[in-house]
Amino acid sequence: MRRFPIGIATRLSLVMALLAAPSLTPAFIEFEEETGVILLHNELRPYYDSNINANSEEEDDFIFQSRPTLQFLRKSGLLHLDLEAGAELAWFADFSEFDYQNFVSDARLEFPKQNERNYWYHIAGGYNQSSNPDRFLGERIDSDATTVEGAFRYNFSDRFGAQASVGFLDSAYDGGSRQNRGSLADDTEIRGRLDAVYIYSDKLDILAGYQYSDTDSDYDFEDHTFVIGLNGEITPKIQGKLETGWQFRRAAPVTGGNQDKPFASIALSWLPNDRWNVTADVASAYGITSTGGSEDGFRGGLTVAWLINDKLIATLGGGYEDITYDTPGFTRDDEAIFLNGGVEYIFSERAQLRADFRYEDWDSDDEFRTYERWIAGLTFRFSL
């Protein structure tokens, strides 16, 4: 169970008081000329989880979740600024020891693309706490993540350009059983990427690049990835990102030594008409577990969205995931199929109601990590 420090709890109480009193709070505040906007958001979600710890014991519970946040937006002149901070809170009907109060935040400063300018950039970051089942351990743990990232693009001409990005991620873990708590390992990742870009058209880029990342934990990893890809409108009805290549992981011998495999990062959207949207995503990349071990993952999915009318949207999707864990002393392979769907009703731009479900069927070398899981609930999102 995680609780806020007193200072954060006081600020949260103020935000929640404002959210609870819309008659005293204007829908939004606009600053003349500078076009600044302050918004109060909240998500209220009651849901059922058939397996709250993601393991073969399959303990279930009903959970109520709330996510109140305060957002400041300014899009004026050359810079766009987006700041948001708040909380994610949850109460469990039976397992109250898993109740949590987490701080969430996000900040983004953008110098956006404009037709008359040949460069643009953005800087983003945040500090976020979370409380979720850990797939590797098979129980719930808490995590704190600090992120900072930036990207810069420069076009040398109408046909050629370059783009660079850097990122920093610091993750800390806590909670779980006494046995697993002692094996948790915080980690820090630093990454950078450089791409050469061929501007095929004003809607499509062709790129070739290299990405490097260094992860420091109980065991250290260096990842080198060589990439070619497309980004933008691939055909008049298909748009998105399609990247492939090869990746190499350099690691200490105790973690299994060096590895290499194909790399893929695909996120495509097909719009056959104005009422249907089909999205496909594929990811094949290395990662790290909460205990500092190596993770080799592949994931693929397909989702269909149907705009029934101007107020109602239905979605249905599914996919497959395979993860190989390589931790000192053993290796483990987990695979799953998943299915999800929902229906969303749009009352207005500031209020939506969604009913959704998710089903997972995991099979593992370890019987404790072999299970089924159902999640179903309602989500009411509104802004004041």
Image (cartoon, rainbow, N blue to C red):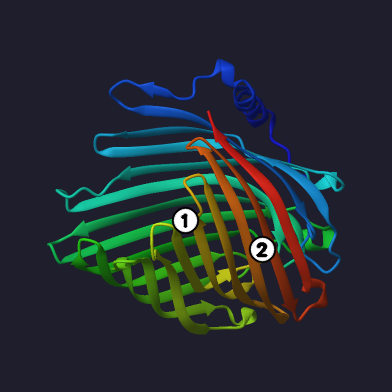
Query: What secondary structure is found at the residue carrying circle 2?
Result: loop
Report, in whole angstroms, how far the alpha carbon at label 2 lies from the one at label 1: 17 Å
Q: Position of residue 199 (x, y in %)?
A: 20, 66
Seen at 29% across and 50% down, the residue is 121
Q: Which residue is drawn at 39% across and 66% down?
A: 272
Instruction: Please identify the quadrant where the N terminus is shown.
Output: top right
User: Residue 191's x, y, as percent?
Assistant: 43, 63
Task: Name the residue nearer the viewer: 241 or 277.
Answer: 277
Q: Name the residue under label 2.
A: 290
The residue positioned 67% from the left and 74% from the top of the image is 336
Residue kind at label 1, given as amino acid type:
Phe
Q: What element carries label 1?
A: strand
Position of residue 141 measured from the top left corner of the image (x, y, whole percent): 73, 55
Crowd class of label 1 (few under 14; some 14 to 19; many from 20; radius 10 Å): some
Name the one closer to the observer, 304 or 333.
Answer: 304
Q: Where on the picture, by quarter, is residue 300?
A: bottom right
x and y percentages locating residue 168 in the rendered image: 47, 56
Number of residues whose C-alpha sits closer than 10 Å to that of mark 2, classed few (under 14), some (14–19) or many (20 or more): many
Q: Nearer the viewer, residue 177 or 343?
A: 343
Q: Is residue 139 among what the camera can see?
A: yes
Q: Can residue 182 be seen in this view?
A: no
